[in-house]
Image: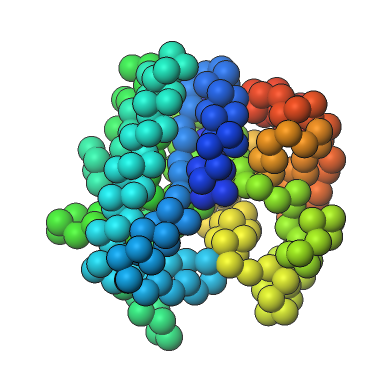
Amino acid sequence: MEKLSVIKIGGNIIDNEANLASFLTAFSQIEGQKILIHGGGKLATKMAADLNIPQQMVDGRRITDAATLRIVTMVYAGYINKNMVAALQSKNINALGICGADANIIKAHKRINATTDYGFVGDIDAVDTEKIMQFLHTGLSLVVAPITHDGTGQLLNTNADTMAQAIATALSSKYEVSLVYSFERKGVLSAIEDSNSVIPIINPQNYAALKESGQVNEGMIPKLDNAFEKRGWQGYHWRRSRLIAIISWQCGHNHSKKLIITWKQINIHTHLLQQLYYKSLLQLLLLVRRRT
């Protein structure tokens, strides 16, 4: 079975020019087929502030009114997406920048919540695996922005962590998938101001308590919600999708933490992975795969 790497990066990499350049160099060195899903919320927040458009986050997810939807579409599917595509082209990676509405690859519906009106936020209904595979089989690497549509002409802002999980799950029956969440911390921290306060084990039981206490909050919630999502990883899907890893991207440091879901124990264990001045993500993925 062919290998497929699905990598998700967020704003703390995107917003740092050196970190982004380092990441894209590493991404370009990954052998085989690959998909990059990106966020970019910090830039969207800054643009909204510049335009005096108030922003509200609930559990790491952005409340998206009509004005905010225009901003995130321009920032995610426009500026950020196309700049990364151009950077990858300079590294001889033939990349195609798309969002969920393009080629109808991801359809969603407007979120319905009993207590919170999220506005134009989309929850994913379907991923067109055949269309994605057509792109991949032509030699293209996909760069996917977290904008979806509902099939009636309405764009929707969709969490990038959720999109990465949905794409990896949908393709897991076709490929041996590695899904990697890449971010700037050493791991999940019990105290945000203490970079060494990594929580060594997170399971479904203590995760609920960590959320309730506020130790796990904001943007980490969607990552872990998706990590513990059972619906997409049952049966042959989770067996063929080897793992989900959450990996910090700290340019210039000689080590980082990776969090790997061990499906038999349904725990997330923290392991120390030595990296010398940020060796390539290719090497990182190979080490992760050897552990499985």
Residue 239 is at least partly visible in this image: no
The image's colour scheme reads rainbow
Relative to 237, say whether 266 is above or below: below
Could you tell whether 140 is left or right of 251 in the image? left
Q: Residue furthest left?
A: 153
Relative to 259, say whether 49 is above or below: below
The percent position of residue 40, horizontal first and vertical second, equals 45, 50
Relative to 99, say whether 201 is above or below: below
239 or 23: nearer the eye?
23
The percent position of residue 291, horizontal first and vertical second, equals 78, 32
Where is residue 156, by image quadrant?
bottom left
* Residue visible at 24% across and 68% down in the picture: 66
* Residue visible at 28% across and 62% down in the picture: 69
54 or 117: nearer the eye?
54
Residue 66 is at least partly visible in this image: yes
Where is residue 276, by image quadrant?
top right
